[in-house]
Amino acid sequence: MANVDIALINPHPIETAPFSTEEKLPPLGLAFLAAVLRKNGYEVRIIDNYLRRDPIDKVVKEVRRLAPSIVGLSCSSLTYLTCIELAKEIKEQLGVPIVAGGPHATVLPNSLLQHPFVDYVVIGEGEHTLLELVTKLSKGEDVRDVKGIMYKNNGKQIFTGHRPFIENLDSLPHPSRDLLPMSLYPNRTSFCSRYPVHSINSSRGCVFGCRFCSVHSIWGRRFRCFSHLWVLE
C-alpha cells in the first residue's frame, strides 16, 4: 500500500450539469500546488477525474490505495456536488483532513464548510497557503495563523484573513506535469482549429471586474506576469 503525504483531486462534473466544458486540459492549478509541496519535501499524487470521469467509488478506492495523510479537492461550481460526495466518502473511509480550494471554494467557502466532512477551505491563490496549512497539520500545530483559509472551531466558521498575492511568480517551481497522464489529454480546443495545442500559465490577475467571472476573486484585479512561459519539460 502506498503512503503519500497529500492526494490532490480534480473532481468530475455531474452528468446532469446544465453546462460544462468538454475541453479536458491538464489542471495546471493542481500541478503548481503539487510542485510547491514537492519542493518542500512532501510526497504528492494528483487524480484528474475531470479527465477520466471514473465513478466515485473507483476514485475513493484509488485514494485508499494511496493512503494519504491529507486530501485536497479542487472545487468549481460545475464539480461542487461531486466534490462534496468525494469529501464525504473519503472522510468516512479514511478519516483524514479534507481541504477544498478553487473557484467555488474561494467565492462561496461557507457552502463547503457547512458540510461536516470538509475541514478547511483555501481561499484565493493557493500555493503558499496550502503549503503552510499542510506543514501545520503534519506537525499537529494550530492553524489559526495560516492566512487565506477558513475552518471550523467548535461549530463556528473562522476566516483567518486574506493572504497577499505572490508578487514574484517566477519564484514558483515548474508545475508537476509528470504527476498527470499527459498522453491522455486530447490537446484540442474549440478556440483553435489547429492541433495539438497545450495550456500554459503566462500571467495571473485581471484589471477588469466582470460580474460573471471569478478570476479577480482568486488572482486579483491587476496583472502579474511570469517572465517566461511554462513549457513542457
Image (spheres, rainbow, N blue to C red):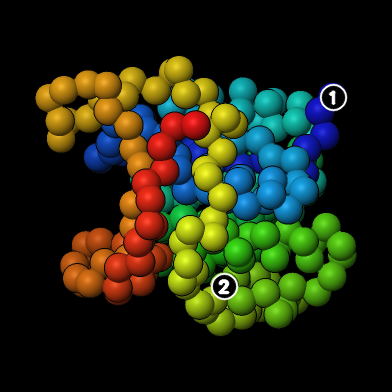
**Which of these two is toward me, 223 or 17?**
223
Residue at (57, 73) in percent of width and height: 148
Give the farthest residue toward the top. 183
- Figure check: 158 above or below 79: below
Answer yes or no: is residue 118 visible. no
Q: Is residue 130 left or right of residue 51?
A: right
The residue beneath circle 2 is 148
Q: Which element carries disc 1, helix, strand or loop? A: loop
Give the mark count: 2
Q: Is residue 66 left or right of residue 75?
A: right
Residue 139 badge: none
The residue beneath circle 1 is 1
Estimate the spatial distance between the alpha carbons at disc 1 and disc 2, rounded to whole Å: 33 Å
Please tell me which of labels 1 and 2 falls first in the chain.
Answer: 1
Q: Is residue 184 left or right of residue 203?
A: right
**Which of these two is toward me, 56 or 10?**
10
Residue 183 placement (x, y as % from top left): 45, 17
Residue 142 placement (x, y as % from top left): 80, 74
Find residue 204 and report its image quarter.
Answer: bottom left
- Figure check: 114 above or below 178: below
Residue 39 placement (x, y as % from top left): 69, 49
Q: Are marks 1 and 2 in contact (CB under 8 Å)?
A: no
Say which amino acid is labelled 1.
Answer: Met
**Which of these two is toward me, 135 or 231?**
231
Q: Is residue 21 left or right of residue 45?
A: left
Say which amino acid is labelled 2.
Answer: Gly
Q: Which element carries disc 2, helix, strand or loop? A: loop
Residue at (38, 57) in percent of width and height: 227
Residue at (78, 66) in percent of width and height: 136
Residue 110 placement (x, y as % from top left): 51, 68
